[in-house]
Image (cartoon, rainbow, N blue to C red):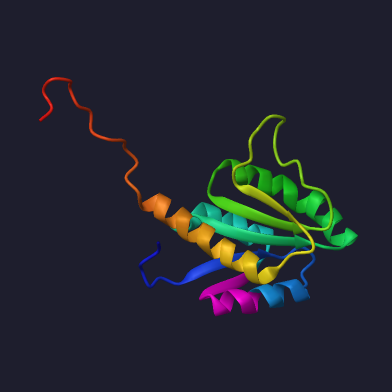
Amino acid sequence: MNTTNQEQFFFWLLIDNKLDEVFYSASSEFARLGIKLIPVKIDQVTRLAALTNMGHITVLCSTRHSLQYSLFTKHIAPVLSMLLRQDRLTLFHFSSFQKLDLGAKGLKQKNYFFLKYPLNLESLCAKLKKFHELRLDRTKAWPGGRRAKVPGLAV
């Protein structure tokens, strides 16, 4: 687990420059768990991914209305597909609509998670915190494997 006292941040992607009630509910739930939820625009997400020394960025996004979904698919999804391929961020997309096709056919998206409304925010926030802690632990792990042994010489 994450044993440091470092502050944890999740980022909420603004689509139409408005914060809805889902953001406020999620923000209060994450605050209870010790995580700050910060609203950002897509250009700020690209700068965070390019310039930050954070190991991994967790971005949440909600599209509940048709206007939000159309803005998301036209302006934000093309940028996100490039960022997701770089493996610098993880996107959790909450939507009333269908899952986005964010890559080439057959490309496995390991950083894009789609969750359909209605959602239980209390359990979802707890699971996202656990996911983030596991992701941080994995970045701290030694990238190499086990030490090679020669048969017959190992003691």
Q: Position of residue 12 (x, y in %)?
A: 66, 66
Which residue occupies 40% across, 61% down?
Answer: 1
Q: Residue at 46% of width from left, 60% of height from top?
A: 133
Measured along the vertical axis of the image, is residue 38 above or below residue 135? below
- Tell me: 83 left or right of 140: right
Q: Is residue 49 above or below residue 64?
A: above
Task: Please name whichever residue, 75 or 119, is drawn nearer the observer in this view of the structure.
Answer: 119
Q: Residue at x 31, y 37 (%)?
A: 144
Q: Nearer the viewer, residue 19 or 127?
A: 127
Percent from the top left, x then y, of residue 121?
A: 68, 69
Q: As drawn, is 125 to the left or to the right of 119? A: left
Q: Residue furthest top?
A: 152
Residue sticking out furthest to the right: 66
Q: Is residue 67 magenta?
A: no
> Which quadrant of the view contains residue 40?
bottom right
Looking at the picture, tell me which residue is in the foreground, 47 or 108: 108
Say left or right for 103 vs 111: right
Position of residue 122 measured from the top left corner of the image (x, y, whole percent): 65, 71
Q: Is any part of residue 19 visible from this angle?
A: no
The front one of 85 and 23 is 23
Q: Which picture quadrant has residue 48?
A: bottom right
> Could you tell me which quadrant the C terminus lies in?
top left
Residue drawn where x is 40% and y is 64% of the image:
2
Residue 51 makes an appearance in the image:
yes
Q: Position of residue 89 (x, y in %)?
A: 56, 52
Q: Say how many tags the image has.
A: 0
- Read off the magenta span: 27-38
